[in-house]
Amino acid sequence: MNCSRLHRIYRNVFSLITIVVFVFSVIKVSAQDIHFSQFYLSPLNLNPSMTGVMDAQQRATVHYRNQWAAVAGSSAYNTYSASYDRRVEVGQVDYFGIGGTLWSDVAGDANFGTTQAKVSFAYTRKVGGNWSKQVRRNMKKSGLYLSIGADAGITQRRVTPGDLRWPSQVTNGVYDPSAGFDEVIPNNNFIYPDLAGGILLYGLDQRNNSFYIGAALHHLNQANISFLNRQESLFSRLTIHAGGELRINKILSVVPNIVYMSQGPHLEILPGSAVRFNIGEYEGVKDYFEIGLWGRIVQNAGTNGGSSSIGSDAIVVYSKFSFSSYSIGFSYDHNVSGLSQAATANGAFELSLTYMLFDPNFRGYLSPRF
């Protein structure tokens, strides 16, 4: 492929991504979704177009996040997620991805809970690289890939009225938890469908440098999420994310990442970078250790009709160790917002586990190392 043709492919692909991001941005985007500081290690929650995007044949991930334990104690916010996906080859370089995710979130004294089960699909096509017959045996060594994906799920929302504090339980200014209550929640446990779509562009070169950039829009159908049998649509969530790996030498790499998420009046930006130390190779799989630092910036809706505010929320310290088919990641959010005094600066800790199944017949296919 000559340079002019490759340039046209790059230009057309980036134009497509720009159009998609613009369309996503103008769609209306009331509750905030779950979020992980290790967003790049929860690919199916981040963007359905990442389904099957890996340098293995199969992948299983488990994620756990605990937040606000210093403030809420035993009522801390807990989020759990488990996913599985695999790639199915189409021809010599393209492939389908198929996967599924189950996540659950329990928040606060009221045990407000959300659980979702979803299936994800993606198709990834090679759109750039060297296609000449002379180097066809090296087609998997470098290239530019475009992935388009979607997911569909069922979500359950629930709250236990007995876990809430009601005005009828207050007598002379004193709350009596043993007192009965007259208030009624008409619909305290319900389910609704949920749809999402996304796009991802990624590429690698002969030196294993890589990049990726993607966009996704979740809650396309904007389901009604009211407990009170009135109309309260779930805001769509726009996610734009990017990252890559820059090889400094055979041992050292720099791994930058950033994610932007916007949902209704809420906004979150999480930029940062890690340093990756390549420590060897076992059975053809590269082993490494990395450590990094991220900063979370948020914007929340104002209270009592006030204006919204934007500012620093947390500093995230992160480490990950990957050996053979297994990797484990740990991160800690150090709170720097206005809640830092009540939380004594403690924010959240997060643990992730990933298992990759490598088949010798599939090993070597291109994908960034997330």
Image (cartoon, grey):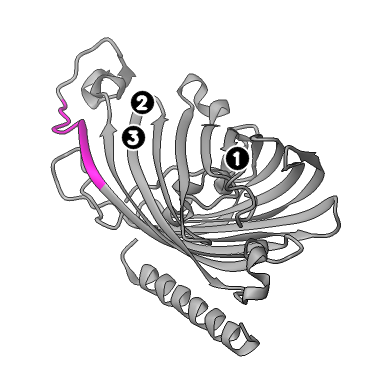
Q: Is residue 278 left or right of residue 299?
A: right
Badge 1: how crowded within 10 Å, few (<14), some, or many (20+)? some
189 within the magenta span: yes
Q: Residue furthest top?
A: 178
Corner quadrant of residue 325:
top right
Residue type pointed to by label 2:
Asn
Label 3 SS:
strand
Label 2 SS:
loop
Q: Position of residue 224 (x, y in %)?
A: 20, 48
Between 339 and 37, the one nearer to me in the picture: 37
361 within the magenta span: no
State the separation of the CA atoms marked 1 and 3.
Answer: 34 Å
State the separation of the CA atoms marked 2 and 3.
Answer: 10 Å
Residue 265 in view (yes/no):
no
Q: Position of residue 232 (x, y in %)?
A: 21, 50
The residue that mark 1 highlights is 358
Q: Nearer the viewer, mark 2 or mark 3?
A: 3
Q: Nearer the viewer, mark 2 or mark 1?
A: 1
The residue that mark 2 highlights is 111
Which residue is found at the position 45% from the left and 46% from the top? 45
Q: Quadrant of the N terminus?
A: bottom right
